[in-house]
Image: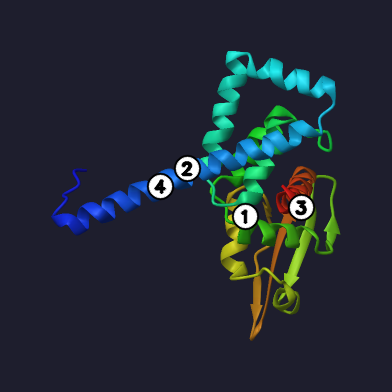
């Protein structure tokens, strides 16, 4: 698409937009690198050697580029810190390569508000515990008490679409002014919640 620039005002606005875009990209990249550097400081010598060896390889450089590109596609500093922890193989977590790939994909472009809701939903008492997942039912009374709840009938399907929550096989029900909505949460998703919680705390001190 060709940009039509008319008058000095238009040129000035175009320059401001371009400058803001470049500053945003630089800030996100700097934050990711800063978070990785903070993790490097607390690594064991063996972990540091492994990271440096990875950075010396073309595969490691491509992996770094992938993580940076993903960091550019989110407005959430919590998620950027999570990417840094995943990239550095934080010892508090034992994610497989597939788990990491799924989490990075699921968190792309998510907002901090939705991240905080996801964490809060995962802490609700399950109504059933199956081998593969926990089922959580939110009634209208519980929904009113959720601190980060906006429109749960929009936000929960969005988390399901991202694969962070699992769809419930039973349909939601309505009765006069009462309603309920249910979803499942897998063991991997609960580990993702722990990752996001650690990221949130580290972001405050980094």
Mark 1 or 2, closer to the camera:
2
The circle on residue 159 is 1
88 to 57, vertically: above or below = below
Q: CA distance from mark 1 to mark 2?
A: 26 Å
Q: Residues within 10 Å of mark 4 (few under 14, many from 20)?
A: few
Q: Position of residue 16 (x, y in %)?
A: 33, 53
The structure residue drawn at horizontal position 62% and vertical position 20%, both measured from the top left corner, is 60
Please tell me in which quadrant of the rendered image residue 144 appears: bottom right
User: Quadrant of the rendered structure where residue 85 is?
Assistant: top right
Q: Which mark is residue 201?
A: 3
Q: Which residue is mark 2?
A: 25
**Foreground of the two, 202 or 182:** 202
Asked if the residue at tag 1 contacts the one at tag 4, i.e. Cβ–Cβ closer than 8 Å, the answer is: no
Answer whether labels 4 and 2 touch (C-beta < 8 Å): yes
Q: List the residue tagged with mark 4.
A: 21
The residue nearer to you, when weighing 111 against 203, is: 203
Name the element at disc 3: helix
| Mark 3 Cα shell of 10 Å, populated few (<14), some (14-19), many (≥20) | few
Q: Is residue 168 visible?
A: no
Mark 2, other Cα within 10 Å: few <14 / some 14–19 / many ≥20: some
């Amino acid at each position: 698409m060709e940009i039509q620039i008319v008058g000095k005002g238009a040129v000035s606005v175009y320059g401001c937009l371009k400058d803001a875009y470049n500053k945003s990209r630089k800030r996100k990249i700097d934050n990711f690198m800063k978070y990785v550097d903070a993790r490097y400081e607390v690594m064991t010598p063996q972990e540091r050697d492994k990271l440096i060896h990875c950075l010396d390889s073309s595969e490691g450089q491509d992996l770094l580029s992938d993580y940076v590109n993903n960091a550019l596609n989110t407005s959430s500093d919590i998620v950027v810190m999570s990417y840094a922890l995943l990239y550095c193989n934080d010892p508090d977590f034992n994610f497989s390569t597939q788990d990491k790939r799924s989490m990075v994909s699921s968190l792309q472009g998510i907002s901090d508000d939705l991240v905080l809701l996801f964490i809060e939903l995962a802490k609700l008492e399950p109504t059933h515990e199956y081998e593969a997942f926990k089922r959580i039912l939110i009634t209208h009374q519980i929904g009113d008490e959720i601190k980060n709840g906006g429109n749960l009938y929009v936000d929960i399907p969005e988390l399901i679409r991202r694969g962070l929550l699992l769809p419930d096989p039973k349909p939601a029900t309505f009765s006069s002014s009462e309603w309920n909505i249910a979803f499942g949460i897998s063991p991997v998703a609960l580990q993702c919640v722990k990752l996001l919680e650690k990221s949130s705390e580290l972001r405050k001190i980094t």
